[in-house]
Image (cartoon, coloured by chain):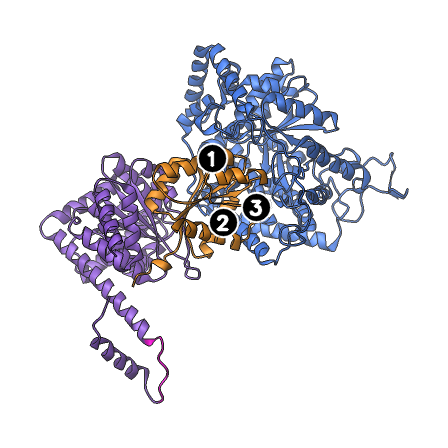
Amino acid sequence: MDEKKEFRTMSGVPVTSVYGEGPLPGEFPYTRGIHSGMYRDRLWTMRMFAGFGTAEDTNARFKDLLRAGGTGLSTAFDMPTLMGRDSDDEWSLGEVGRAGVAVDTLDDMIDLFADIDLGQVSTSMTINGPAAILLAMYVAVAEQGGVERSKLNGTLQNDILKEYQAQKEYIFPPRPSVRLVSDVVSFTANEMPRWNPISISGYHIREAGSTAAQELAFTLANGFAYVEAAQAAGLNVDDFAPRLSFFFNSHSDFFEEIGKFRAARRIWARWLRDRYGAKDERSHKLRFHTQTAGVSLTAQQPEINIARVAIQALAGVIGGTQSLHTDSYDEALALPTEDAARIALRTQQIVAHETGVTNVADPLGGSDYVEWMTDEMERQAEEIFKHLEELGDGSILEGVYVGIENGWFVGEIADAAYRFEREVNSGERLIVGVNSFTEGGDEDIDLLSIDPGTEDIQLKRLAEIKQSRDSDLVEKALSRLSAEAVDSEINLMPAIIEAVKVRATEGEIVRALESVFGTYVEKAFV
Amino acid sequence: MASEDSTLISLVEKASEGDRRSVGRLLTLVERGGESAEQVAESTHTLSGKSHVIGITGAPGAGKSTLTACLARDLAVSGYKPAVLAVDPSSPLTGGAILGDRVRMEEASEAGAFIRSMATRGHSGGLALAVPGMVRVFDAFGFNPIIIETVGVGQVEVDVASAADTVVVVVTSGWGDAVQANKAGLLEIADLFVVNKADRPGASDARRDLELMIDLSQVTGQATRRPDIVMTTAIEGDGLEEFKNAIFEHRDFLSEGEQISFRRSKRWKAEVRSRLDYLLSEVARESIENIEEKEGASPGSVAREIARNILKKNDFR
Amino acid sequence: MNKKENAPIRIVLAKLGLDGHDRGLKVVARMLRDAGMEVVYLGLRQTTEMVVTAVEQEDADVVGISMHNAGHLTLAPRIVKALEDAGLDVPVIVGGIVPENDLEAMAEAGVAGVLGPGASAEDVATCVREAVATRGE
């Protein structure tokens, strides 16, 4: 605790870094926060998600955000890239560069980070099915720029389990996909100690319609599943657990969210220490990124979303997040304009510098309501863990596989989503601007439109690269990859890195893996 | 109804030529019941009687639809022209339904299988009416085998099974499934049992339970062939070949001697019975719509009176 | 005993393209079931061919397509045309995020109705019924 610097309220009243009794922030089980000083020592990372069009377009937006005060990069990829398809794939028609940046080969990645020193900046990449490939590209770009892989700082989302439960960006079936995730975990544990190989995510689960407790429980259960998988692959829990990170949603019910974040830390600490035998305290400390709830933002009267985001951001901060993305007010309509993204970033900066909430760690700790809410979230989560354990005959990993296979997760989420919808429909739950207070906000706002020429530019570039690269080397690299994929004992990262360096495309690498792993088709549980 | 007649004729013509859209339309006419359904029945009656009809049912969660999807795809790929009638329950409250079987059969569909989703539509008797008619449409236009897939182990499923030549009941390794199946009377009509998720503990116990129950029913029942039991793990693709072969074996068994005609006449009789039940229940429903309680008259006597009046009338439609 | 009037509406629900957001589609499926309709739920990552095949075999009365990532300008006209080419006179309703400016283009492409986010269960059911009724005339 840094008592040297004095922290005062706006009116000059000095405040200490924490209030109340019980376990302190920085003390097991970390309910009140993972660091003793929390934001006094260091603010959360203001990490704004960005990506659209070509790598060049996104590179420009990255630089804007860094100049405006953003402290980390976060990359959004387009739908084809997320699904492991190249821009020239028949499924990619009309989707190239629309929901994020298009990346087909290493050359796109080089352009994406042009003039950005990867040794100085921390980068998050939101990608799952093909995550290992994008990480390989990032490493190759860094090394080309003279930055050793061991110095690289950042996060790969790489959380395939939640794809089957919520986001649906899967490629291969669950078990080979978890193998790939484990390969990344081992690789980074050995060679990239500053890299977070998984961002175990609840955000998408919540966006798909789950309750707060389900978001909490499904996410932590997935986390436990990855721990079990990595242990089964021969890793010692303390070798990788310190670098597992989380990603939660921050939704509109203020105190429920704060209770959820606190419960998350407490549960993770207990389970890692008592159930999985982690001894290193860094393994017990749950670190998380937060994004404000996109699904709560309305198309009607979009400017009022700024207020929603501010409140949700505040909940995330009071909940002790390590990193935060605030949505832009035009979220429900299109990708953010430059202005809208700026406003979202300014929102964080207001919370950080004007509200004084950063002066005290876990300022709501000790509130009867918040403590009760924390306990309640934990209680509901434990019930879900019990169910998964039963499904898996004692293993959470197996229970998660079964829950995916028999549609339990998607069923629970769809039920919760429907319940919510009915509440809104019946007027039991009011949404301002949607089923209440609907006047106003009829002026059109400016929306970001993606240049339709993007697709052509990307296609041309891809064709040129395919022409100019050494196709023998590519073939060899892909054969090596397929051969190694068959043996689950072999870590695939080196082969993937080799492949990206010779300009194998993302799609080609995915197809090579698919030929061994198979393709996943969801059984459409409604 | 002249224009409807000519539409019907042209639909039947096009369907005979292989137009699947027309088959789809004819199925709808049958499903809706009434006069159009009768007319379709007339048109297709003589054309049908060639296809092997397989009924697949079992408790929810038994993995039935995976099995059906694999079977349909396998058949399509092997050169057959299969059709699947996938039945899902309608909501008793709203009458609507979510029919999610089709999407599980994407591969089968792409290989050429005809997939039709069907809701039970509330009146359980109605399903037993519509299914034979729809089977006949498929039969008439060259689809073979025809698979009827239902979910559950209740009376509805027993009714639907009476429209099939080969009845398959799918259970899983939880022993409860076998007991459930027994209770509903599915055991008496099952020709083939599948124990799915055979890789799970308890699978061999489930098999043993089934063998026991079959033994008991053999003693009391009139089954002429002991049902086979096949072990599968559908999701891994294990046991599918055996499953398919067991179905073909039963089909071959049926075509020996009098089996097939015995079964077909059973089916025919069951269908007549369903229609009769339905007609009578409709009339009964109409007859009591406006009755009022009479002092001193017992419900039994009132019912007998009404029945006498009904039997005097003869304008059933 | 002609029950044609009482037969439930049969609707095919699908998402075209790569987008994986199916929360809205699942909610709509339940809304329509609760409104007494039969929903043939195809779900994610359908091609126009798969949708056309489904409409044919299921003899659907109407098709509902869900769009969330600006794909509507390319994909909606494509499905309308594919149905037309297959001789299927079935209305297409688009649901999801369609900006005001694009509504005219949708109508011109032959889309029978557009449902925005925040459409109530009544809105959805009414839109479907009207589309079916209009086409029947």
Quarter occupied by residue A127: top right
Q: Secondary structure at mark 1?
A: helix
Q: Which residue is mark 2?
A: C28
Decide which of C15, A359 is in the foreground and name it: C15
Residue type for callout 3: Pro
Where residue A456 appears, as percent x and y from the top left, is 52, 21
Quarter occupied by residue B180: bottom left
* Span shown in magenta: B288-295
Residue type for callout 2: Val
Chain orange in the figure, letter: C
Residue type for callout 1: Leu
Residue B293 falls inside the magenta stretch: yes
Residue B61 visible in this rendered orientation of the protein: yes
Chain under disc 1: C
Residue C3 falls inside the magenta stretch: no
Going from the N terminus, do you reach mark 2 or mark 1 first? 2
Chain purple in the figure, letter: B
Decide which of A148, B147 is in the foreground and name it: B147
Going from the N terminus, do you reach mark 1 or mark 3 first? 1
Q: Secondary structure at mark 2?
A: helix
B65 shown above or below B294: above
Residue displayed at 68% across by 53% down: A437
